Amino acid sequence: MNFLRYSSNAWGQRVLEGVSWDLFWYFVGAGAVFIVLHASYMHFFVNRAKQSK
Amino acid sequence: MSSSESANASSVRLVRHGAVTRINHWLMAVCMIVLLLTAFLPILGIQFDWVTIHWIAGLIFFVSVSFHTVYALIRQDWRSMWIALDEFADIVSSMSGSLNALKVTPGKYWIMQKIYHHSVAFLSLIVIITGILMLFKIDIPFWERNPYIFSNATWGVIYVLHGFSALFFIPFIMMHIYFAFRPEKLFYTRSMIRGWITGEEYRSHHDPQKWVVEQSEEEEHQVC
């Protein structure tokens, strides 16, 4: 997995272009994982604990 | 609390966000959605003339963030966003949304709300500064393009900072929308639409000594 994008200029030198867009889905996934973990935590621990009181 | 006090607490409306704050918040939200869509849809293969929409939304976002910063410093209590060191003890327990799970009672904002705000503020600062610099690469009504003000290497760093910040915005916005729809947080969302929370919500989620609120004008009229 590449974190950055590079290209070559007219002199054949490597030029930094920006961040790799391959990372897009990793960031979407990170958000989704957080949401699933938090929703699970709230459902299985917090809300059930409140109901059992 | 007696039953009459309880009924009063649920009917009383207390101002959490004034009209100016709410309008500016939703302006920022629209800008952010437009910015993310115009940034990432072309990358996902949906091609359209995104550049003009993107930089105009970016400029409006910049004005909105600047206004918010000045307004918060002059007209609001900026200390409500200050994080005290002892609040970090509540980072995990604050996610449950239970006041009795906390070691430090919250004022207007909970510790995670403050951390979220500061994280987004930091990301916004980066995308705004780098975004304005990137405007020098295109023709806009304010100036003609001049891509030679920086070397290729410097432009690369600017693009990397802008891109990484934009990517970090994705999970942050997802989390923000998720929490806005969570049942126990819906009253915060309502307060960002209509401005108020009830006295009951206030007492069950905030320390009245740390967040002193006024009764909403609408409610005062009703009481009168």
Image: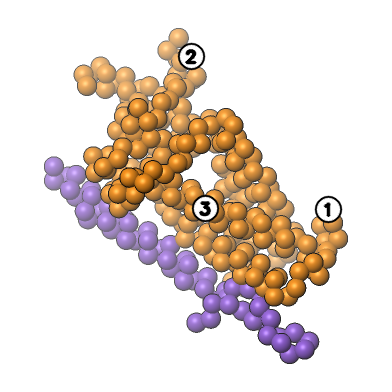
Q: Is B120 above or below relative to A26?
A: above
Neighbor class of circle 1 (other Cα within 10 Å; few <14, some 14-19, many 20+) is few
Quadrant of the frame with the C terminus of chain B? top left
Q: Amino acid at mark 3?
A: Val
Q: Colour of chain B?
A: orange
Residue holding disc 2: B221
Residue at left offset 75%, top offset 60%: B135
Q: Which chain is purple?
A: A
Q: Is B109 above or below relative to B199?
A: below
Neighbor class of circle 2 (other Cα within 10 Å; few <14, some 14-19, many 20+) is few
Residues marked 3 and 1 touching at CB (< 8 Å): no
Q: What residue occupies the far bottom of the structure in this picture?
A: A12
Q: Is residue B80 left or right of residue A15?
A: left
Sequence-first tag of 3 and 2: 3
Q: What residue occupies the far top of the structure in this picture?
A: B224
Chain containing mark 1: B
